[in-house]
Image (cartoon, helix red, strand yellow):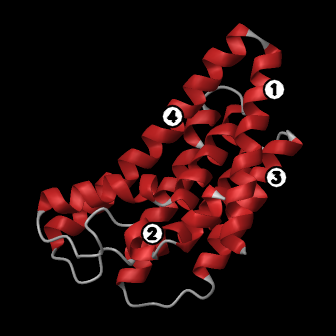
Amino acid sequence: AALGLLALTPSAFAHHPMGGATPETFTQGLLSGLGHPIIGIDHFAFLVVIALLSFALAGRARFLVPIAFVGATVAGTLYHLGAAELPLTETVIALSVLLGGLAVLVRGSAPALLLAAAFGAAGVFHGYAYGESIIGAEASPMLSYLFGFSFIQYAIIFSGIKVMDLIAARSEKLRSLAVRLGGVPTAAVGAVFLG
């Protein structure tokens, strides 16, 4: 029921801490950038997916692969700001969350390069959606917006990987439960948004 109600909220308010207004100052741009990936439940769910899938990677790859997503979101935003059209954006975002949640549930490990490519492709669409909030802004709020959403996305992913490290150190059973508890809701969010 809660997911259904979230899907009915107006997109401008569900994705923008400034209430739909274009940020006019550096601080407003930064706050908007920090808030967008958290307020947008579909974007936040995909960050959880990235953390859970990246956790399965070995060594530095778990922290490097998510950079493909963060970089692609910046590229997607710039693409939107360049007045280019990207069709089916919200549909692809919902599909990325649904398929990502299902991938987490399958618990298969994918090669780092394949994950980076998938995260990058999804990132362009997520970034394109982020760009809607900043159209018409001056350079200063635009740059702070880009920094804000890049920083918060990576911080959420990094924190998720670290939390999974702590859980896995305690027990393999707890780690498996945490993965399932992350995969089911993210797939559900994707399904609701796709619907």
| Residue 75 circle label | 2
* Residue assigned mark 1: 176
Residue 105 seen in this snapshot: yes
Label 2 to label 4, Cα distance in Å?
21 Å
Q: Earlier in the sequence, mark 2 or mark 1?
A: 2
Q: Is residue 107 above or below residue 100?
A: above
Q: Which x, y percent locates residue 158? A: 51, 34
Q: Earlier in the sequence, mark 2 or mark 4?
A: 2
Q: Which x, y percent locates residue 86? A: 55, 86
* Residue assigned mark 3: 102
Q: Residues within 10 Å of mark 2 (few under 14, many from 20)?
A: many
Q: Is residue 120 above or below residue 79?
A: above
| Residue 158 circle label | 4
Residue at 13% in and 60% down: 26
Judged by depth in the image, the label closer to the viewer, 2 or 1, is: 1
Does dot 3 land on a helix, a strand or a loop? helix
